[in-house]
Image (cartoon, rainbow, N blue to C red):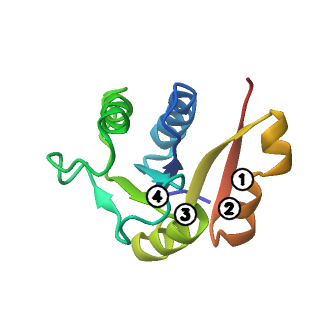
Amino acid sequence: MKYQHILVALELEEESKLLIDKAVSFASLVDADVSLVHIDGTKGEIYQQLIDIQAEPKQKPLDEHSNKMLKQLQQYCEFPFKHFYVGTGDLSKKLETLIASDNYDLLICGHHHDFVSKIVSYSRHLINKSPIDILVVPILD
């Protein structure tokens, strides 16, 4: 199967660069588009829609620190990302809607190997809800 559009679910942390590297490397091999998404679930659902900061660079969807981290991830490499969606609310619900609306065929996400992740794994929620293939990348703490 040849993937055409890869979606990368990011956290606002340095380790997300590993996910970007994986996506860009894989996309280069199969000539696929790559889009990024960050859903901040810590504040609840402040707004329902996702903002594409790739298409609308003047938008500042989160607080100043978070927007700075988003910009760093966006500029991390030279690869031309198709979209960079940012939103708030429930990660699995937002991704389910996004995947259905934009013909993604591979989702890349990270999984921490720490105590909290063993109790509450976002990866498990994504796997249970995702209609597309998922690559779960271990992130060692």
Residue topped by disc 4: 4
Q: Are marks 4 and 3 in contact (CB under 8 Å)?
A: yes
Circle 2: residue type: Leu
**SS under mark 4:** loop
Q: Which dot, 1 or 3, sits closer to the camera?
A: 1
Residue topped by disc 2: 126
Give the percent coordinates (x, y) of residue 103. 45, 70
Q: Earlier in the sequence, mark 4 or mark 3?
A: 4
Q: Which dot, 2 or 3, sits closer to the camera?
A: 2
Residue topped by disc 3: 105
Q: Are marks 1 and 2 in contact (CB under 8 Å)?
A: yes
Residue at x 44% of width, y 59% of height = 88
Whether residue 86 sits left or right of residue 18 in the image: it is left
Circle 1: residue type: Ser
Mark 4 and mark 3: span between their CA atoms? 7 Å
Residue topped by disc 1: 123
Give the percent coordinates (x, y) of residue 85. 36, 55
Q: Earlier in the sequence, mark 4 or mark 2?
A: 4
Q: Which dot, 4 or 1, sits closer to the camera?
A: 1
Circle 3: residue type: Asp
